[in-house]
Image (cartoon, rainbow, N blue to C red):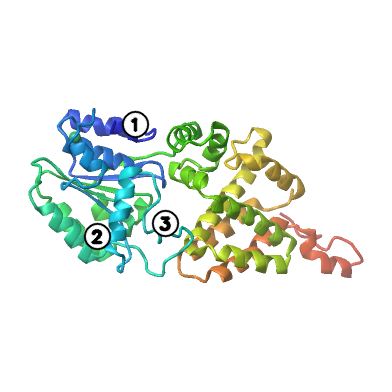
Amino acid sequence: MSWTSVIGQQRALTALRRTISADRIAHAWLFYGPEGVGKRAAAIAYGKALLCDRGGEEECSACCVKVDRMVHPDLHLLMPHPSDADPADVAERIRLVGQNPYAAVDFVRRPSLDDPSRSSNKQALYTVARVQEDMCRAMSFQAVEGGYKVAIVSDAEYLRTDAANMFLKMLEEPPPKTVFILATSRPDRILPTILSRCRRLRFDPLPPEVIAQALVEREGVDPASAATLARMADGSYAAGIDLAQNEDLRALRALVLEFARAAYTRNVGAITDIVERIGRFGRDRVGHVLELLLRWIRDLMLYRTMGEAAPLVNVDQTRAIADFVAALPRADVEAMASVIEEAIRLVRGNVHVSLTLTVLAGALGEAMRGPHSGALYMPLSDAYGGKDASLGRTG
Ligand SMILES: [Zn+2]
């Protein structure tokens, strides 16, 4: 069962299985690729295979069960967490990962397990103290069951420089029979000195039909909804689960379309109202929602060039997208994408969320109206007796 708990990713799994059959186990791995595509699921399956004398080809009733419950003494799953996190909360999240390795139950994406909309003031990260305790100390002991010791470092880009350097020392002289698996969607944020010591394995976005099938089989979603959600999930099974389970998220998506409409019409009252409503979802959700808006804009670009044949992410929005493209032939779609990317960067930093959204509404509206927007030059146009005041402007 263990390898089959991973959805898709056959190329990566084949590479991992080969290391076991050939007995060529790297002591440090970097699993990288987009969020929610199965890096952590594959890391757990690989850990299980390394710990069990059946090599993961079938489940045993001893060690494999311990891994599923996340209580195996030689397998450590680490996740970045705020310095004041309750240890019981950490333990509960790790247990939930054991149940479903695709569940978004980490502190980075979900500061509170009870209230998915709540955001945290404290940043989730790996501190020096935690690296010392949970990695260096835990991994320097002999394996309790006599085989390998495995540490899975999820969201490894959250290793701060000092913590990363401490980890690096361990990587330079790894204790025997230890395997570290770093999982990240941001390999660009990993110290080059760490990268150079890891064997790298890429995880690709999942095809929509693979996500749809898994949503039907694992989450009990009906096939028609699963097909729609799978397209919206943009290669990420975790995003598919999130969309399937979270009505809030679907409501937010509708709110974002309203936001874009208000930005276009420069309806200040509506913008203020929508910004306030979006802001209530918290910084993390807002970042997520802006990502959704960016995907929608990318759909616009695709639809503009390919029409009905475009492989849209927001397939259920085809009509709205077609309407938008027809209604705004002059919209500068590339500029729209770049102002949203900038807003995502600001929101993920520490810039005030409402302020960022309000500024975004202005810039987005401009881009939507396009470089030759009549609306932009209307006052001048009036002054020239209705002639096109943008005359003389080219490009
Ligand atoms: Zn086993």
Tell me if residue 284 can be seen.
yes
Q: Nearer the viewer, residue 306 or 180?
A: 180
Residue labelled 1 has its Cβ within 8 Å of some atom of ligand 1? no
Q: CA distance from mark 2 to mark 3?
A: 21 Å
Q: Identify the residue at image location x=31%, y=39%.
A: 42
- Left or right: residue 47 versus residue 343 is left
In the rendered view, would you say 310 is above or below 152?
A: above
Q: Earlier in the sequence, mark 2 or mark 1?
A: 1
Question: What residue sits right under mark 3 in the picture?
Answer: 109
Q: Earlier in the sequence, mark 2 or mark 3?
A: 3
Q: Identify the residue at image location x=33%, y=56%.
A: 157
- Left or right: residue 239 versus residue 33 is right
Q: Identify the residue at image location x=17%, y=52%.
A: 171
In the rendered view, would you say 343 is above or below 198?
A: below
- Per the image, label 1 sits on a secondary structure element best described as helix
Residue 384 point in image, percent of width and height = 89, 67
State yes or no: discs 2 and 3 in contact (Cβ < 8 Å): no
Question: What residue sits right under mark 2 in the picture?
Answer: 164
Q: Nearer the viewer, residue 157 or 339?
A: 157
Q: Identify the residue at image location x=49%, y=62%.
A: 345
Dot 1, how many residues are within 10 Å of its Cα: few (below 14), some (14-19), or many (20+)?
few
Residue 360 point in image, percent of width and height = 61, 64
Q: Earlier in the sequence, mark 3 or mark 1?
A: 1
Residue 362 falls in which quadrant of the image?
bottom right
Residue 251 point in image, percent of width and height = 60, 53
State yes or no: discs 3 and 1 in contact (Cβ < 8 Å): no
Residue type pointed to by label 2? Ala
Residue type pointed to by label 1? Arg
Q: CA distance from mark 3 to mark 1?
A: 28 Å
